[in-house]
Image (cartoon, helix red, strand yellow):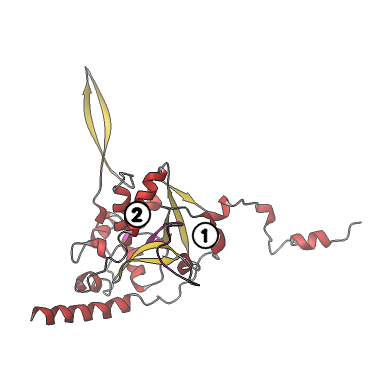
Amino acid sequence: MTAWFDALLDRAGRGIARRLEQPSSGYVPFTPSDFETLQNTLRPADILLIEGRQRVSAAIKYLTQSTWSHAAMFVGDRTVGGSGSEESHRLVEVNLGEGCVSSPLSKYATFNTRICRPVGLSEEDACAVVDFMTCRIGLRYDMRNIVDLARYLLPTPPVPVRWRRRMLALGSGDPTRAICSSLIAQAFQSVRYPILPDIRTVEARSGSRYARREILHVRHHSLFVPRDFDLSPYFEIVKPHLVSGFDHRSLDWADLPTADTRDEAPRS
């Protein structure tokens, strides 16, 4: 009886996951993607935030009040997939209904993305963070947790801002299964690198003087969402076009002659 019921839940979960993975209509990137520049800019342990276009993405963006609905980690030359003529898999991500998988960077070539880079992370710690993620490839999502999946099928009601993040934790009680940023947060916590620490101010007495000091308390990994890497004071926002060298004078404006036209113009 238990095996039959588990099989039924698994089948229902797979059906819901397929619906949630369907693309939303009308998604158009704000700016054209320059895949080659993006590829040359990324470094191991960088976080790639993605503005997803799946049905589940709209709910996550609303509940987190953010453009970013998904996060993946770039693992660099630590190739974790792809063979022969296939593109190397240099991203590790957690997908709803699927689990922890490797993916090629070209998967997000046409998406709006943002690079968040940990600052001051040693090479040893960067390797540890990358290893944490790659070692978990293959962890599967338990399709029997259909409550986690089904909640995204429901119309998202108006919710006060202070409660929206908590709504992501409804369901099985294990948001790591559904929210990609949770596993990434665990990876950085494994080397005690801060993301958005819970800062509590306490009074510390030193002799006859009172001083205020801040103690960093590690937030539970299940409370992290993609936008936290964007908001974190410990991650640098890296814009590929600026890193590669940007000269505004090289832009071609519609109301001005192009560079080629200017060069060809006759001189009096």
- Residue most extreme to the front: 84
Q: Residue at x 23, y 51 (%)?
A: 220
Q: Which residue is mark 2?
A: 131
Is residue 130 found left or right of 150 in the rendered image? Answer: right
Tell me residue 128's x, y (percent): 35, 49
Q: Which residue is mark 1?
A: 39
- Tell me which secondary structure the magenta stretch mostly adopts: loop
Is residue 145 found left or right of 137 in the rendered image? Answer: left
Q: What label does residue 135 carry, if any? A: none
Residue 170 is inside the magenta segment: no
Q: Which image quadrant: the C terminus?
A: bottom right
Tell me residue 254's x, y (percent): 69, 64
Magenta part of the chain? 64-82
Q: Earlier in the sequence, mark 2 or mark 1?
A: 1
**Viewer-closest of 247 and 85:** 85
Tell me residue 233's x, y (percent): 39, 44
The quarter holding residue 161 reads: bottom left
Q: Give the mark count.
A: 2
**Viewer-closest of 155 and 245:** 245
In the displayed structure, 95 sits above or below 165; it is: below
Amino acid bearing label 1: Gln
Tell me residue 97's x, y (percent): 28, 72
In the displayed structure, 121 sits above or below 225; it is: above
Amino acid bearing label 2: Asp
